[in-house]
Image (tube, rainbow, N blue to C red):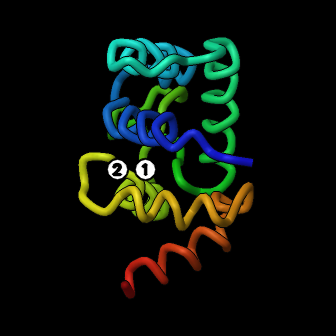
Amino acid sequence: MSYHWDLIERLLHEVQNSAGKSFAPRAYAEQLAQELERAGEHTDDLDRLKAQASEYEAQLLNGGFIAPRPEEEGGNGENFVLTERGLQLLSMIDSSIPGGEHSREVLEQKGSAALVPEVFDEVASEANLV
């Protein structure tokens, strides 16, 4: 299994900006697809990308990368905050940070286990040593 790291990055950025509004992974996937199209990259299956975004939301929540946003921070029961693990993941895959491609490659080598909390924590701790 290969992760769509650009989509995960988009979701994590949207989590950061979700105070007071509902988190909408399918809409974010559509926005990303439009941006990729404008940049000349073709998105094969928009419906699949939207479904993938919803799957990633559940995976990020279950893996402890995101958590429900507290009411005092703009939580409405349908939005999130990044946890320490989520912040670490975002810093590793953020395309605006130099070296992000290497971290994505290291995570990709772990396959579907890359976002398993224990596996990710091990990879992240090794990445911090480099």
Total numbered circles: 2
Residue shown at 70% from the left, 34% from the top: 55
Mark 2 in CB contact with mark 1 (< 8 angstroms): no
The picture places residue 29, in percent across and down from the top left corner, at 51, 21
Residue 106 in sight here: yes
Q: Which residue is identified by label 1?
A: 82
Residue at 31% x, 63% y is 99
Mark 2 Cα-neighbour bin, 10 Å: few <14, some 14–19, many ≥20: many
Nearest the camera: 61 or 31?
A: 31
Distance from disc 2 to disc 1, alpha carbons, whole Å, reads 14 Å
Question: As drawn, is 107 to the left or to the right of 52?
Answer: left
Give residue 122's position: percent from left, percent from top: 58, 79
Q: Residues within 10 Å of mark 1 (few under 14, many from 20)?
A: many
Amino acid type at image mark 2: Asp
Where 1 sits versus 14, above or below?
below
97 left or right, relative to 91: left
Residue 13's image quarter? top left
Residue nearest the observer in this picture, 73 or 2: 2
Mark 2, residue position: 94
Work out which quarter of the rendered image holds the C terminus and state it: bottom left
x and y percentages locating residue 69 in the rendered image? 45, 40
Q: Compared with residue 18, is residue 72 higher up or lower down, i.e. above or below?
A: below
Identity of the residue drawn at 75% across and 48% down: 1
Residue furthest bottom in the image: 129
Q: Earlier in the sequence, mark 2 or mark 1?
A: 1
Amino acid type, callout 1: Leu
Q: Residue at x 66, y 15 (%)?
A: 45
